[in-house]
Image (cartoon, coloured by chain):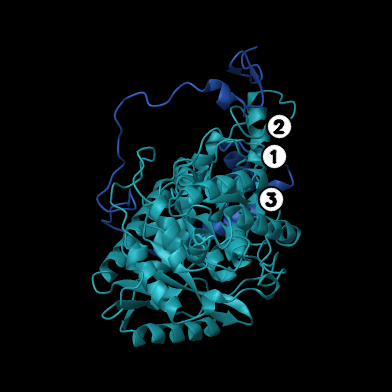
Amino acid sequence: MSLSRRDIENIAHLARLGLSDAEVPVYAESLNRIIALVGELDHAATEGVLPMSHPLPGLTQRLRADEVTESDQRELYQRNAAQVMAGLYLVPKVIE
Amino acid sequence: MHSETVAQLQQGLRARKYSAVELTRALLARIERAQPELNTFISIESEAALAAAAAADRRLAAGDAPALTGIPIAHKDIFCAAGSRTTCGSKMLANFISPYDSTVVARLRAAGAVVLGKTNMDEFAMGSSNETSHFGPVRNPWNLKLVPGGSSGGSAAAVAARLVPAATATDTGGSIRQPAALCGVTGLKPTYGRVSRYGMIAFASSLDQAGVLARTAEDVALLLRPMAGFDPRDSTSVEREVPDYQAALNQPLKGLRIGLLKEFFDQGLDPRIEALLRTALEQLRVQGATLTDVSLPNLPLSVPTYYVVAPAECSSNLARFDGVRFGYRCENPRDLKDLYERSRGEGFGAEVKRRIMTGTYVLSAGYYDAYYLKAQRVRALIAADFERAFGTVDVLIGPTTPAVAFEIGAKTSDPVTMYLNDIYTIGANLAGLPAVSIPCGLVDGLPAGLQIVGPHFSEAKLLNVAHRYQQESDWHQRAPEAYR
């Protein structure tokens, strides 16, 4: 199967990536090549094989105690934001 | 001073042959001179480095100096350092000032290292040539027309050009080992979970691992010791004691069982690199190691497996860049959707967008089973192949890359051609294994790498084999002519 212009536009929408009209066919071509490459996996016999969920055998993600460990550093963190007012992050109006 | 190793600099500093300030000044001058030509650094932090060096000199004088006191290093610009710019090679983070330290940065500072700056890299560590950096390509010090490899191309080129004796790096599919091979330096990707990833900007979380680039295995050992170890702030960090890597370096190789990775000695490998590997293997055999051929039948599926798993995880990790809390924001967004789409569309480069879209596609409704789940099953087969092999051999050896460094621009038109560069390195990431690349010779005057892969947490053994090889060879001492 091969990805069409419309598929690429749909994927870009799902990923919230703005693409120019000129970019769409470029990504269609390269994604089709990548999909062909990963298509080699179809030939692998994986019946009964459990999907790998952690790179280290027998280990799972550790959980920590439900305790407050961080202090409030809102001002410091908000220094990297594009637009802040009264300690709030500003975005374009969502509800008219 | 610039040609000395970390181990030699430790002695020089302690014997007061030179001060940390003198050493730092000398290397900063070298960096400034090389920068227009090589572009290895994104940020050069002269002022902070000189202040840290002066503090190091005071500690050395007071006799209260941890192991790496005064040792100049550079960090790949993927590691957050409080108060300093951390870009990850992207326009998205071009003005990001990290509010906190990554654990790697904090631990190396506590060990006394002096940071000269942050090195250039492929954008978000996605690339094998350092050409995807927003800050321009790094050039290979062996030949300025060639790539240094990637994604840790700045760190590898800086070490090769004798701008720093060692640098930090990260490896998701070969990003430490491949540039190590192409630049003629030593690079270790540790076991998954060995080094904390707290504050290391995420690409693919089931694969990413931090490591070291240096000129010798001994120097890698010296940096790895303080970097490694449990960190409660990284939920993938493993609670396990850190061995004294340096103490194990000299163990004799008698009885070492080496497996030759049959799948790596294939038609894709440059025969001249194969010849160099055979010579190196013979030298290890003379030291008492035994050689046997080992087959990992599922290993050829590494690249397609990786190009499902890594983009899938990348698309999830990079969803955080929304133009709101940090990072690039587009001008005059019309509405929230426009803000997201244009901030991401303008802030990310072409390769990052390609991977985000690939990942979004393989995880999208109707395709998850066919791609992601299938890839995770094949990944289990590849990991099982390695485990079976380590039942009969102690380490596996093969090439790091199929060929030496290629020209800038040669592989940018087709992403799949670029991806195949990592054909020999990706397996270790998929299985979470440690692996080291060391220089094993020159082809047409360009460095080639030998790769050693071991079982989980066998870093001490890998560095031991690498060190014993480096005791009997001088390839790791060769420097590019313009940077001796």
Residue bearing mark 2: B330
Q: Which residue is mark 3?
A: A25
Nearer-the-camera pick, A53 or B116: B116
In terms of depth relative to the viewer, which is nearer, B434 or B346? B434
Q: In the figure, what tint was chain A given? A: blue
For the residue marked with disc 1, what is the amino acid? Glu
- The tint of chain B in the picture is cyan
Residue at mark 1: chain: B
Separation (CA) of disc 1 from disc 2: 7 Å
For the residues bearing labels 1 and 2, Cβ distance under 8 angstroms: yes
Quadrant of the rendered structure where residue B357 is?
A: top right
Q: CA distance from mark 3 to mark 2?
A: 24 Å
Marks 3 and 2: CB-CB under 8 Å? Answer: no
| Residue position for label 1 | B346
Disc 3 is attached to a residue of which chain? Answer: A
Three-letter residue code for mark 3: Pro
Whether residue B132 can be seen here: no
Please name the residue shown 48% across and 63% down the image: B11
Q: Position of residue A69 (x, y in %)?
A: 38, 26
| Label 1 element class | helix
Q: Chain of mark 2?
A: B
Q: Residue at x 37, y 57 (%)?
A: B191
